Amino acid sequence: MIEFLAANKIEGQAIEEEVYATSFVQWCSPEPRRCKGFHPAPGAPVLPWARALWESSNQELRDGLTDQEAHDALMGIVEALTTAITGPEGCPRCADHWEQRLTTVPVPPTLTLDEARHWLVDAHNFTREGKTPTAFETVAIQFNWTSN
């Protein structure tokens, strides 16, 4: 799969991690003896819901929201992330990082749409232990964020 994606100019560490994580979930999890010793990355949790929740969270912070709507959307995102991270398919280590982030940098009582977006990207980077931070500009381009 990785070779196919690379041949089609779809490549990078994040893509490889996603392919390995998906392979693990689809092939190894149902029959662990198939993949003795295989894990997508040493110590990395397998969170099949993570990419979809990240993408939908960023889409919720779309252009055109008022400051109040951005705050309300971010609060809903924080609630959804907390539920997913601490739930049965969550990750205890990730939950600890998330709780630490919420304790040290809680969502402000008021913020602009741009501040909400920065808060979310910064929180995402904080909780991704050992992974290269995602640049805000990269996320803004991916999700077509044009207003500040």
Image (spheres, rainbow, N blue to C red):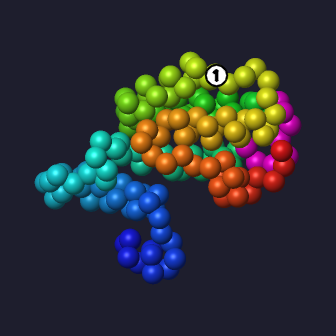
Left or right of residue 83, residue 74 in this image = right
Quarter holding residue 125? top right
Front-most of residues 4 and 60: 4
Q: Where is residue 109 in the image (x, y as percent from the top left)?
A: 76, 20
Q: Measuring 72% from the left and 22% from the top, which residue is drawn there?
A: 108
- Residue 107 appears left or right of 88: right
Image quadrant occupied by the C terminus:
top right
Q: Is residue 97 above or below residue 30?
A: above
Judge left or right: residue 123 versus residue 84: right
Residue 135 location in percent, x, y?
62, 49
Residue depicted at 42% across the width and 33% down the height: 94
83 or 132, which is in the foreground? Answer: 132
Evaluate whether residue 26 shows in this view: no
Picture quarter with the N terminus: bottom left
For mark 1, give the secondary structure. loop
- In percent of the image, x 45 and y 75: which residue is there? 6
- Residue 68 makes an appearance in the image: yes
Secondary structure mainly formed by the magenta segment: loop
Question: Would you say residue 58 sits in the magenta stretch?
Answer: no
**Residue name at image x 59 percent, y 29 percent:** 79
Amino acid type of the residue that numbered disc 1 sits on in the rendered structure? Pro
Looking at the image, residue 66 sits to the left or right of residue 32; the answer is right
Q: Which residue lies furthest to the bottom in this view?
A: 7
**Residue 23 coordinates in the image, percent (x, y):** 32, 60
Mark 1 lies on residue: 106
| Residue 62 covered by magenta stretch | yes
Residues in magenta, as a range: 61-68
